[in-house]
Image (cartoon, rainbow, N blue to C red):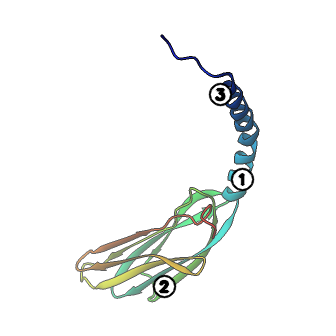
């Protein structure tokens, strides 16, 4: 014999569906608020024999990259970014004579990522998460 679905459960289900539809707009509004939230990113490179630095930037809400050949060391760049899906990134390549260098990403004043490159044509890459939506 099949079990009967209590009438009270049907009412609870209908109420949950109504609340879900009403909260969809609230979720969308909250996402847009977080996606427009700006944050400060500081990129830093220090060490020896760095030939190339590539870093992420936000140009009018679209991800792009900047590149510096043979940067003077230590090198530092501050950018403002925004968006939940924005991921600050920084990479470096050492020259043929080798060396050692570090890349560091700081987001809103807190170190988010650090990496080290060593040796001939050594590379280091840092990628940090957006703080949007994490209470930062």
Q: Quadrant of the C terminus?
A: bottom right
Neighbourhood count class around disc 3 (C-alpha, 10 Å): few under 14, some 14–19, many 20 upward: few
Find numbered disc 2 in the image and state the secondary structure of the residue it sits on.
strand
Q: Label 2: which residue?
A: 75
Return the disc, 1 or 3, that comes first in the chain's sequence: 3
Label ID, residue 30: 1
Left or right of 91 on screen, residue 20: right
Q: Residues within 10 Å of mark 1 (few under 14, many from 20)?
A: few
Looking at the image, do the residues carrying marks 2 and 3 touch, with CB atoms under 8 Å apart? no
The residue drawn where x is 45% and y is 87% is 72
Left or right of 132 on screen, residue 67: left
Q: Residue at x 68, y 58 (%)?
A: 34
Where disc 1 sits, the SS reads: helix
User: Which of 127 and 56 lies nearest the eye of the viewer?
Assistant: 127
Question: Quadrant of the rendered structure where residue 51 is?
Answer: bottom left
The residue under the point 69% across, 35% down is 16
From the top left corner, tell me how far across and down residue 24 is, in percent: 71, 40
Q: Position of residue 110 (x, y in %)?
A: 54, 80
Please tell me whether residue 16 is drawn above or below residue 103 in the rendered image. above
Q: Nearer the viewer, residue 122 or 1?
A: 1
The tag earlier along the polypeptide, 2 or 3, is 3
Which residue is identified by label 3? 9
Residue 18 against residue 85 in the figure, above or below: above
Tag 1 and tag 3, C-beta contact below 8 Å: no
Separation (CA) of disc 1 from disc 3: 30 Å
Front in this rendered view, residue 52 or 136:
136
Of marks 2 and 3, the one in the foreground: 3
Image quadrant where residue 81 sits: bottom right
Looking at the image, tell me whether mark 2 or mark 1 is earlier in sequence order: 1
Q: Residue at x 69, y 31 (%)?
A: 12
């Amino acid at each position: 014999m099949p079990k009967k679905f209590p009438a009270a459960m049907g009412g609870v289900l209908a109420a949950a569906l109504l609340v879900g539809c009403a909260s969809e707009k609230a979720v969308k509004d909250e996402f847009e608020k977080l996606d427009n939230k700006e944050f400060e990113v500081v990129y830093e490179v220090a060490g020896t024999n760095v030939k190339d630095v590539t870093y992420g930037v936000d140009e009018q809400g679209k991800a792009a990259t900047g590149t510096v050949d043979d940067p003077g060391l230590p090198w530092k760049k501050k950018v403002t970014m925004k968006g939940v899906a924005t991921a600050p990134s920084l990479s470096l390549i050492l020259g043929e004579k080798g060396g050692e260098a570090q890349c560091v990403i700081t987001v809103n004043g807190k170190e988010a990522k650090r990496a080290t490159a060593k040796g001939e044509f050594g590379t280091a890459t840092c990628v940090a998460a957006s703080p949007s939506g994490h209470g930062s």
